[in-house]
Image: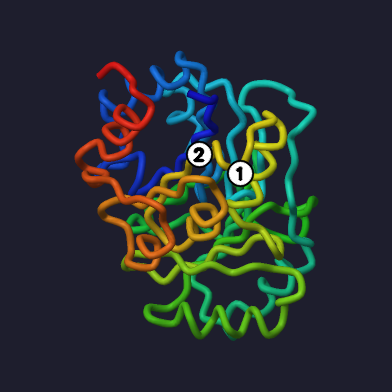
Amino acid sequence: MHQKLITLDLDGTTLNSSSQLSPQTIKTIKNATAAGHIVSIVTGRPYRMARDIYDELSLKTPMANFNGALTHIPHQKWDGEYSRTINKAVVYDLMKHKDDYGIQLLAVESKDSFFADHAAPASFEFFPHEISNDQILTEKTLRTNPTSITILVEPNSAQKVKNQLLHYYGEYITVGVWGGPQSVLEIVSKGIQKAKAVAYLADYYHIDRQDTIAFGDEHNDAEMLDYVGRGVAMKNATDQIKGIANDITEFDNTEDGVAKYLNEYLGLAE
């Protein structure tokens, strides 16, 4: 079998409902790597929330964070690393108009930095519930352009705020709405999408598009699944993603769906 580039979404795909890797998934990914395939994480998560997963899988390949705005090889200097940033003037403007947008939490981050206007509430698990003084977001502390902006807004207002943000800043940014109960918007540089990260990795490894495989479950995986040679939707994926995919896993993310699919497709020993 030709060497494959296998790109993995994390939440709702490679991770189970407890946001953990199962022993079966770890074993399968290690077996795929040992068989000569390239396995890369391509996630909306920031690096700080994907680092441990990368290490648990014993990967040495590039990882894409923030839906492809940052592509890097953890723990080493890599000439191919890139980051697409947002002009910090957008952040300063958002800080001035927090009340206009109903912003309850404003956070910005890059590969190794995180700033927020205040610590996250206990119910908001994606961000630190304690931050140091030098992590408090001000025009003085934010000195470089960030890779990602995340805002928590009033319940049920995410779509309205997204439209407002695109009206004012649309030539600079791409805005995504998180799934789940909280109204959260994630902002990256205009044109960022997971598919571009996959194309970059395929070019880096000289792997034909037809030999690329991607797994995903949510709207931010759409372009990636459409781009690759074999786009695989999880059994638990949205109908939109299932409609784009070439195949659907027989098992969902709580049942080692990715691992079972790869074992069969790549002919790996279970």
The Cα–Cα distance between marks 1 and 2, rounded to whole angstroms, is: 7 Å
Q: Pick the quarter of the image with the C terminus.
A: top left
Query: Quick one: 141 or 60, which is closer to the camera?
Result: 60
97 to the left or right of 213: right
Give the amino acid at mark 2. Thr
Callout 1 secondary element? helix
Residue at image location 24% in from the left, 47% down from the top: 252
- Residue 134 in view in this figure: no
Residue 214, x across and y down, in percent: 47, 44
28 to the left or right of 77: left
Q: Are marks 1 and 2 in contact (CB under 8 Å)?
A: yes
* Residue at mark 1: 198
Total numbered badges shown on the rendered structure: 2
Residue 267, x across and y down, in percent: 34, 23
Query: Quick one: 223 or 219, which is closer to the camera?
Result: 223
- Residue 198 in view in this figure: yes
Mark 1 or 2, nearer chain start:
2
Residue at image location 73% in from the left, 45% down from the top: 83
Residue at image location 48% in from the left, 28% down from the top: 54
Residue at image location 49% in from the left, 71% down from the top: 104
